[in-house]
Image: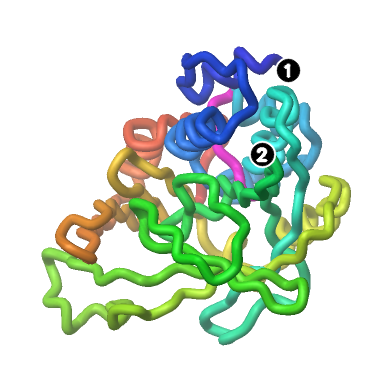
């Protein structure tokens, strides 16, 4: 495993002498714009192994993406190689349908300490709730980024990660028809976590469980999302969504296309730079 090969994979060719915030931000942005959040292995009959060599081979050498356990584990390795003070944390994601957080930890994120300041770095949430830059771990402070305003709230050692929702403009629909058209100031809860350091092995059981449990979203839907320079691409099943952030003041432009079976693999190649070895069943 070679850090230069990883840099090649994420198209990063800037100097990286110092383990500083500027370098971290640049590497992170390259990482999220080249490595898709995807669970396609599960829908191609491939097992997902949670060890670093397998993850490295899959993402760096085969130019695939992965889910949070893989993407953030690879980023953890890269940041360690570059001399960052980085540790793995575990989170419980918010389930809007259940109006609550999951009972068990089901997400992995990273904490990086630079000159005494702590930052949360998470390349593995995908979709519209993906941060674009490291976020300072500070309670109650709005941190605006291109995807929207993120903030953390801390309560008795538990941290809550949230984002202010934006309106969506979908050309084919009038805004009144769109159910996820939030009023301004509406908060979307994302996940909660503590600062207890974890090891990747703590997630082996979760990795196995998510691949067999029929009721989790990752089993129900094939998902591939990628951050772009001005928004995001998401292929969920046969539905391709292209979002452009802040297309107008506080409104995102959303284009939705339904693909035919034969268009799915071509779209994965053209839009996400993914070529699958096995047949995908969306």
Question: Which residue lies at the image location 60% right of the left edge and 21% below the top edge?
Answer: 6
State yes or no: residue 66 in magenta.
yes
The answer, for residue 46, to whether it is visible in the render is: no
Q: Are the residues at dot 2 and dot 1 in contact (C-beta closer than 8 Å)?
A: no
The residue indicated by pointer 2 is 114
**Is 188 situated left or right of 168 in this image?**
right
Position of 230 relative to 17 (above/below): below
Q: Spatial distance from mark 2 to mark 1, Cα to Cα?
A: 25 Å
Residue 199 visible in rendering = yes
Query: Is 150 covered by the magenta stretch?
Result: no
Find disc 1 in the rendering and name its residue: 1
Residue drawn at point x = 48 percent, y = 31 percent: 26
The numbered dot on residue 245 is none
Q: Which residue is drawn at 46% across and 36% down?
A: 29
Overall secondary structure of the magenta stretch?
Answer: loop
Between disc 2 and disc 1, the foreground one is 2
- Secondary structure, mark 1, is loop
Determine the residue located farthest toward the bottom in the rendered image. 99
Q: Residue 156: percent from the left, percent from the top?
A: 76, 78
Q: In which quarter of the image is residue 271?
A: top left
Q: Residue furthest front?
A: 115
On the image, the x and y values in percent for residue 152 come to 57, 67
Start and end of the magenta stretch?
62-68
Q: Is residue 99 above or below residue 216?
A: below
Q: Residues within 10 Å of mark 2 (few under 14, many from 20)?
A: some
| Residue at position x 57%, y 18% in the image | 16
Q: Earlier in the sequence, mark 2 or mark 1?
A: 1
Q: Describe residue 206's horizontal placement relative to residue 218 as left or right.
A: right
Residue 150 vs 101, above or below: the answer is above
């Amino acid at each position: 495993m070679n850090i230069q090969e990883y840099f090649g994979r994420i198209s990063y060719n800037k100097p990286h002498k110092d383990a500083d915030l500027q370098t971290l931000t640049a590497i992170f942005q390259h990482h999220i714009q080249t490595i898709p959040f995807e669970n396609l292995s599960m829908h191609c009959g491939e097992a997902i192994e949670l060890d670093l060599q397998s993850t490295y081979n899959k993402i760096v050498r085969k130019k695939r993406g992965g889910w949070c356990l893989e993407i953030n584990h690879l980023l953890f390795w890269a940041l360690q190689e570059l001399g960052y003070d980085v540790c793995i944390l575990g989170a419980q994601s918010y389930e809007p349908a259940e109006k609550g957080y999951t009972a068990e930890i089901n997400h992995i994120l990273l904490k990086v300490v630079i000159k005494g300041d702590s930052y949360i770095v998470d390349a593995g949430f995908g979709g519209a709730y993906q941060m674009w830059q490291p976020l300072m771990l500070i309670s109650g402070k709005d941190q605006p980024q291109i995807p929207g305003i993120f903030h953390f709230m801390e309560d008795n050692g538990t941290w809550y990660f949230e984002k202010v929702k934006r309106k969506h403009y979908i050309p084919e629909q009038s805004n009144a028809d769109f159910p996820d058209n939030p009023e301004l100031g509406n908060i979307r809860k994302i996940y909660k976590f503590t600062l207890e350091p974890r090891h990747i092995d703590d997630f082996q059981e979760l990795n196995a469980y998510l691949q067999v449990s029929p009721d989790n979203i990752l089993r129900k839907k094939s998902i591939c999302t990628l951050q772009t320079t001005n928004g995001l691409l998401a292929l969920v099943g046969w539905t391709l969504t292209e979002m452009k952030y802040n297309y107008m003041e506080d409104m995102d432009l959303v284009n939705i296309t339904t693909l035919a079976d034969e268009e799915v693999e071509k779209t994965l190649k053209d839009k996400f730079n993914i070529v699958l070895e096995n047949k995908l069943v969306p």
